[in-house]
Image: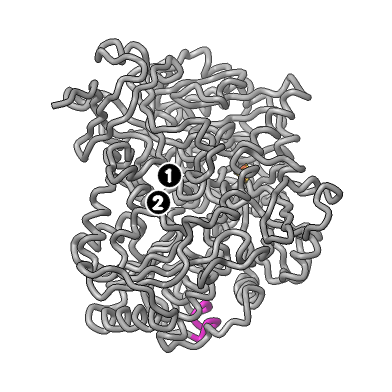
Amino acid sequence: AATNHRHTERFFSTCCYCGVGCGVTVYKDRKGRITVEGSPDYPVNKGMLCSKGLNLHYTVNDRQDRLLYPQMRMNRSMPLQRVSWDTALDRAAAVFRSLIARYGPDSVGFYISGQCLTEEYYVVNKLMKGFIGSNNIDSNSRLCMSTAVAAHKLSLGEDSVPVSYADIELADCFFVTGANPAWCHPILWRRVEAHKAANPRVKIIIVDPRRTDTAAVADLHLPLNPGTDSTLHYAIGRLLIEQGHLHPDFIMDHTEGFESYRQRVFARTVTEAAAICGLPEEDIRKAARWIGAAKGYLSMWTMGLNQSASGVNKVLSLIDLHLLTGKIGIPGSGPFSLTGQPNAMGGRETGGLANLLPAHRDLANAEHRRAVQDYWGSGPLSAKPGLTATEQFEALAEGRMKAIWIMGTNPLVSLPDVRLAEEAMKKARFVVVQEVSRRPETLAYADLILPAAAWTEKEGTMTNSERRISLLDKIVDPPGEALPDSVIFSRLGQKMGFSGFDYEGPADIFREHALLTKGTSIDISGLDYAILRDRRSVQWPYPTDGGAASAEGTPRLFIDHKFYTPSGKAVFHAPTDEVRSEQPDDDYPLILTTGRIRDQWHTMTKTGKVNKLKQHIPQAFLEIHPDNARELGIAEGDIIVARSRRGDVRVPARITDGIKKGTVFLPMHWGKILGNDLNRTNNVTNKLLDPVSKEPDFKFCAVSVEKYKKR
Ligand code: SF4
């Protein structure tokens, strides 16, 4: 590779899209333009990149849409005007101080992103929880991973993914549910496909109401009725017990709650479960036989389970299958939550969600609060959980919150029932948008716009789905006056009069963060930028004394079958399999599910400007079964209106028998185009939340569909 790039400088980074976290080698020419290729020796991707990763350089080289300097207005009827950084941050600090003095610290909030670097998460979380005195800081990770986090904590005692990508090549049965990794985690899926190609006896079971590209390579596709995941998991659990595949010693020595689990799974016959799931009974039996016979059993899931009003219950019932069979903490086995965003896990390490403290400490635990407070030298930390993503916007709409600071996320496209978020932005007294691009819809409501540095324009770390922390080089200077987010938040802390925000740079922030993890389950106190530069990445924990960690860190957790619960045992939960989602009725007879397409990322503020990526699927669409289309008089390509109790969407129809009858699908990416929001999926979705994780129900709401008629 180096000979192809003579006369250039070479750098290392990590792809800033999905949680697979592929290693990227970046070359910079004399004009400062970059090219990218997959790093051949990086353990995650071994030289491969998917379509999004291969086009990363376009988003850096094309700076036409970048925000270049701070802009401010004194009220919404005035135009935004260019101001200096000092003026912008003085105003932000003054408004926040005045609102806090008048209405209390919970009157303000930060809504940040799973695309933030760990150092950025650390500083803003410290500022808000330690010094402003509120836990109203949440990330858009709330929309994707909070369910998996809650289930891991309940079941394993901590938010800890037990496995590594290296377990893929050691597994002989994959149960992939609520996920389309062929499109959404492509490089990880290529590893699964290559493993299957080399070992035809490997079994792949895909659970999804849609026959996706992932399902195309399955040995068994289970197109279940939306929402019935727990019922399926319990039916498999019952069969595993009946077929003698349970692991009595593991259950006895290392788990709690098996008896209630046994009662739960035997409360319903497999025949009854098959009818509820809309699946052939024999297919469920086949899945159970393959799981039971496997030496290495990996279950992989993502938004199909997480983005649900019963999401935590679904994930708990999936993890139960590993506890039942003892297939956790051994090679090729374990529950594997596939992270959506590139640094959702790093953000959680710093405690960057409304209900967390740094290093997976608990907000409700007074000793944990005290430890963090002492370390930060801050005032007492509030024990009251902060408002989560959707709750912050509700609080703004109702006047309970007065100001919001939005960073690196686009809630006016991505939040459920998005018109509520629009109302919130209109009612907010003060909106700060800290952003890279001029594209996000939120900018229209900003009182203060702060230009941020983008990928390759700043140094910092991220953690991928397998707990792998990597260091991203700074490669080019940010355009105009844009600054790294950690610098912006540090300066805000100083402007607000707080101490502890005079960092020398990201390495300094990282060390402070790393030392705060000492003695916790994610201990990385032995880690610093020098080690990361040398090794490029390691997997946590990485304690100072070596411990379980090798030079590369800790690839697999729970090898001693000691879990992070108070008893040291993993816990069967066996919650109800009741579907809590909005049910179809005569007015809204179809179930809408939403998701990603292969070549777009989130609300398209980055991928939407790359022509090559727009070619795959250039416009939004609604996928519908031929029988439903026929009943509704809809032909391929007809413009349809999908309507819910909250709003409507107008897009062309795509008719396919690859979707379960009675279910329709919309991609999540599109927002306002040419000033209208007719193809914005979240006009129709529901703000119903999982009661534990507070993750929205993006995968299930009731809609009607009809052919669009001009009035
Ligand atoms: Fe980037 Fe994910 Fe593609 Fe890897 S699989 S190149 S991390 S988008």
Mark 1: amino acid: Val
| Quadrant of the image containing the C terminus | top left
Residues in magenta? 371-377
Q: Which mark is residue 133?
A: none
Mark 2: amino acid: Ser
- In the displayed structure image, the side of residue 123 where residue 700 appears, left or right: left
Residue 513 location, quadrant:
bottom right
Secondary structure beneath label 1: helix
Q: Give the x, y percent position of residue 407.
A: 43, 63
Instruction: Classify 10 Å Cα crowding around label 2: few (below 14), some (14-19), many (20 and above).
Output: many
Task: Kindly check if marks 2 and 1 are in contact, taking CB atoms under 8 A apart as contact.
Answer: yes
Identify the residue under disc 1: 312
Q: Residue furthest left?
A: 711
- In the displayed structure image, the side of residue 647 where residue 6 appears, left or right: right
Identify the residue under disc 2: 693
Q: Looking at the picture, does residue 663 appear above or below residue 544? A: above
> Principal SS element in the magenta part?
helix
The residue located at (73%, 61%) in the rendering is 30
Instruction: Classify 10 Å Cα crowding around label 1: few (below 14), some (14-19), many (20 and above).
Output: many
Q: Looking at the picture, does residue 518 appear above or below residue 210? A: below
User: Looking at the image, in which quadrant does ligand 1 appear?
Assistant: top right
The residue located at (74%, 19%) in the rendering is 200
Residue 575 visible in this rendered orientation of the protein: yes
Residue 376 sits inside the magenta stretch: yes
Residue 568 location, quadrant:
bottom right
In front: 524, or 246? 524
Secondary structure beneath label 2: loop
Which is more N-terminal, label 1 or label 2? Answer: 1
- In the displayed structure image, the side of residue 702 where residue 143 appears, left or right: right
Q: Give the x, y percent position of residue 602.
A: 46, 45
Q: Give the x, y percent position of residue 236.
A: 52, 25
How far apart in space, not on screen, are marks 2 and 1 (Cα)?
7 Å
